Image (spheres, rainbow, N blue to C red):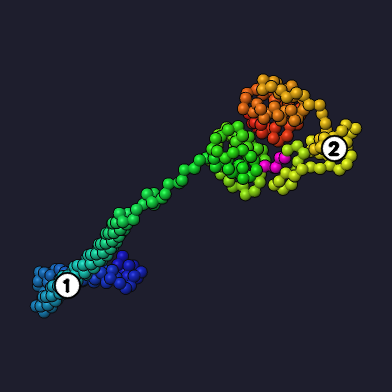
Amino acid sequence: MWEAFLHAYPEGFYANLAKVQLKKIAAEEARAAAAERARLAEQEKARLAAEGARQADIAKAAAAAKAAEEARVAAEKAQLIEREKAADAEKARLAEQEKARLVAERAKQVEQEKAAAAEQARLAAEKVAEEKKQQLAKVTPSAATDKPEPPQIDLPRALQAALRRVGCSTGAVNGIWDAGSQKALALFNRYAATKFRFGAASVEAFEAVKSRSGRVCPLICDQGYKADGNNCVRTSCPRGYRLDENECKKASNTPLSKDGELKTKRSAEPTPNGSCLSLSSLPACTAYCKRVASNSFEETACKKTQARLAMSNSCFRHLSTCDPTR
């Protein structure tokens, strides 16, 4: 077995141990052979003595036995020496193994100490950073306390002003969200394609109107006037034509008024208690609207009259309480 190990691994620490073991086995075998030879010599000596052999043979046998004994003793000494060498080799192996274990443990301990030192340094750095943060918080006031509160605005008044700027309102900017203001926001919804509730002023509606830089609602002029940019100019028709719903149409035999409008029979101005349906001409309706704008009257009748007479823009404004979404 040891020969096969040395054949595979001829050099190295364990190869030396194998060689020591082989020498130990060889010494043991030599001792056994010497002992066997001594035993055989003694037997031969006894045989020769028993047989009465010659003195020379006995002396020779004695010398052989002595030599065999000396060889046995020498073999035992050699065996003892090889055992001591094997023990020394084993001690050296164990010492080397213990040394390697101690080196590994020391390296592990060093790594643990480095990790502990790094953790302590991290905790110390975090502590210093937290202390600096607390000191800075004590010295510098927070942004929340320094931030000024947003100014309070009169939302209805601001929305009225914005609607007036984009051409959707001609009413007063007084902060009272009345029917005229609702109508203005409804007009903005119509021409800006929005869907804001116009029952009350809202921040969303104000922001949407404020974001518009130019006119949104078209300019609506009174009867006999037409829009020219941001102004209303009087509409004039050439001879032989008359003004009909702000359009010049070919005149009939009916005489025209000085304003170019078709003369119609005016009904008597009604009393404030009269019906809107009793009006038969636009001027009478306009006068009636001016007188009863602050009074309540039948909504359905007013709407029918508006559709029938195609009232001017001024008449519509007076009838805002009758049809605020107009």
Provide the residue designation for mark 1. 81
Q: Is residue 201 left or right of residue 70?
A: right
Provide the residue designation for mark 2. 242
Residue 103 on image: x %, y %: 25, 66
- Front one among 84 and 146: 146
Q: Taken as a whole, is the magenta stretch helix, strand or loop? A: loop
In the displayed structure, 137 sits above or below 31; it is above
Q: Residue at x 17, y 70 (%)?
A: 84
Q: Residue at x 61, y 38 (%)?
A: 171
- Judging from the image, what secondary structure is the residue with disc 1 in? helix
Residue 141 on image: x %, y %: 34, 53
Q: Residues within 10 Å of mark 2 (few under 14, many from 20)?
A: many
Q: Is residue 61 visible?
A: no
Q: Residue at x 69, y 47 (%)?
A: 230
- Front one among 47 and 275: 275
Which quadrant does the N terminus fall into? Answer: bottom left
Residue 166 on image: x %, y %: 63, 45
- Judging from the image, what secondary structure is the residue with disc 2 in? strand
In the displayed structure, 141 sits above or below 184; it is below
The residue lying furthest to the bottom in this view is: 56
Q: Which residues are magenta?
A: 217-221
Residue 64 on image: x %, y %: 14, 76
- 250 drawn magenta: no
